[in-house]
Amino acid sequence: MQHKKCSTKSATSFQHVYDKLTFNQAMLLQAIAKEGVVPAINSGSFIRKYALKGSSSVNKSLGYLLDKELVYRSSNGYMVYNRYFGIWLSNL
Protein backbone atom coordinates (compact mmCIF):
# COMPACT_ATOMS: atom_id res chain seq x y z
CA MET A 1 0.00 0.00 0.00
CA GLN A 2 2.85 2.41 0.81
CA HIS A 3 4.34 1.94 -2.69
CA LYS A 4 1.02 2.81 -4.31
CA LYS A 5 0.73 6.04 -2.30
CA CYS A 6 4.25 7.00 -3.32
CA SER A 7 3.44 6.35 -6.96
CA THR A 8 0.28 8.45 -6.76
CA LYS A 9 2.20 11.28 -5.10
CA SER A 10 4.87 11.10 -7.79
CA ALA A 11 2.31 11.07 -10.58
CA THR A 12 0.60 14.13 -9.09
CA SER A 13 3.94 15.90 -8.81
CA PHE A 14 4.88 14.95 -12.39
CA GLN A 15 1.50 16.17 -13.67
CA HIS A 16 2.00 19.49 -11.87
CA VAL A 17 5.40 20.03 -13.51
CA TYR A 18 4.09 18.93 -16.91
CA ASP A 19 1.08 21.26 -16.72
CA LYS A 20 3.36 24.28 -16.26
CA LEU A 21 5.17 23.65 -19.56
CA THR A 22 4.24 25.31 -22.83
CA PHE A 23 2.91 23.05 -25.54
CA ASN A 24 6.27 22.98 -27.37
CA GLN A 25 8.22 22.29 -24.18
CA ALA A 26 5.85 19.48 -23.22
CA MET A 27 6.01 17.87 -26.66
CA LEU A 28 9.82 18.01 -26.72
CA LEU A 29 10.10 16.59 -23.20
CA GLN A 30 7.72 13.77 -24.11
CA ALA A 31 9.67 13.03 -27.30
CA ILE A 32 12.96 12.85 -25.39
CA ALA A 33 11.36 10.54 -22.83
CA LYS A 34 10.02 8.22 -25.53
CA GLU A 35 13.44 8.03 -27.22
CA GLY A 36 15.35 7.53 -23.97
CA VAL A 37 18.43 9.28 -25.36
CA VAL A 38 18.43 11.79 -28.21
CA PRO A 39 21.90 12.22 -29.72
CA ALA A 40 20.83 14.71 -32.42
CA ILE A 41 18.06 16.88 -31.01
CA ASN A 42 17.85 19.03 -34.15
CA SER A 43 17.86 16.21 -36.66
CA GLY A 44 15.07 16.38 -39.20
CA SER A 45 14.09 12.78 -38.55
CA PHE A 46 13.62 13.38 -34.79
CA ILE A 47 11.67 16.58 -35.36
CA ARG A 48 9.42 14.92 -37.98
CA LYS A 49 8.92 11.73 -35.98
CA TYR A 50 7.40 13.69 -33.09
CA ALA A 51 5.80 16.46 -35.19
CA LEU A 52 7.83 19.10 -33.38
CA LYS A 53 8.10 22.68 -34.58
CA GLY A 54 11.29 23.80 -36.35
CA SER A 55 14.77 23.51 -34.88
CA SER A 56 14.69 27.08 -33.49
CA SER A 57 11.59 26.19 -31.48
CA VAL A 58 13.23 22.96 -30.35
CA ASN A 59 16.32 24.90 -29.23
CA LYS A 60 14.25 27.43 -27.29
CA SER A 61 12.27 24.68 -25.55
CA LEU A 62 15.42 22.69 -24.90
CA GLY A 63 17.05 25.71 -23.26
CA TYR A 64 14.15 25.98 -20.83
CA LEU A 65 14.12 22.24 -20.08
CA LEU A 66 17.89 22.28 -19.44
CA ASP A 67 17.59 25.38 -17.24
CA LYS A 68 14.87 23.73 -15.13
CA GLU A 69 16.92 20.51 -14.96
CA LEU A 70 14.16 18.45 -16.53
CA VAL A 71 16.60 17.36 -19.24
CA TYR A 72 20.37 16.96 -19.23
CA ARG A 73 23.00 16.26 -21.84
CA SER A 74 25.11 13.15 -21.36
CA SER A 75 27.95 12.06 -23.60
CA ASN A 76 25.35 10.03 -25.54
CA GLY A 77 22.76 12.78 -25.98
CA TYR A 78 19.83 14.44 -24.23
CA MET A 79 17.85 12.56 -21.58
CA VAL A 80 15.08 13.24 -19.08
CA TYR A 81 16.82 14.01 -15.78
CA ASN A 82 14.49 12.02 -13.53
CA ARG A 83 14.20 8.43 -14.70
CA TYR A 84 10.75 7.96 -13.17
CA PHE A 85 9.48 11.18 -14.70
CA GLY A 86 10.76 9.88 -18.04
CA ILE A 87 8.82 6.65 -17.62
CA TRP A 88 5.70 8.59 -16.67
CA LEU A 89 6.10 10.86 -19.73
CA SER A 90 6.65 7.98 -22.12
CA ASN A 91 3.31 6.52 -21.05
CA LEU A 92 1.31 9.66 -21.90
Image: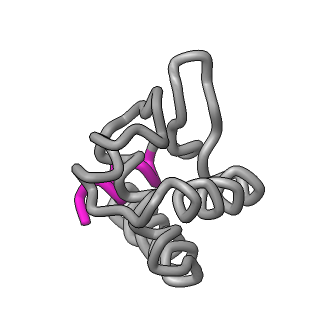
Q: Which image quarter is the C terminus in?
A: bottom left
| Residue range highlighted in magenta | 84-92
Considering only vertical position in the picture, is 85 above or below 52?
above
**Magenta stretch secondary structure, dominant:** helix
Identify the image quadrant of residue 81.
top right
Specify how the rendered protein is coloured. one colour
Q: Residue at x 45, y 79 (%)?
A: 23
Picture coordinates of residue 77 (x, y %)? 52, 27
- 80 falls in the magenta region: no
Asked if residue 49 lies left or right of residue 61, the reply is: left
Q: Residue at x 43, y 33 (%)?
A: 38
Residue lying farthest top? 75
Q: Nearer the viewer, residue 92 or 41?
A: 41
Picture coordinates of residue 39 (x, y %)? 46, 27
Picture coordinates of residue 67 (x, y %)? 77, 55
Considering only vertical position in the picture, is 46 above or below 51?
above
Residue lying farthest right? 67
Asked if residue 40 lies left or right of residue 71, the reply is: left
Asked if residue 60 lies left or right of residue 89, the reply is: right
Q: Nearer the viewer, residue 8 or 72?
A: 72
The total number of labels drawn is: 0
Q: Which image quarter is the N terminus in?
A: bottom left
Q: Residue at x 47, y 72 (%)?
A: 24
- 91 falls in the magenta region: yes
Q: Nearer the viewer, residue 36 or 39?
A: 39
Q: Nearer the viewer, residue 3 or 33?
A: 33
Considering only vertical position in the picture, is 59 above or below 13?
above
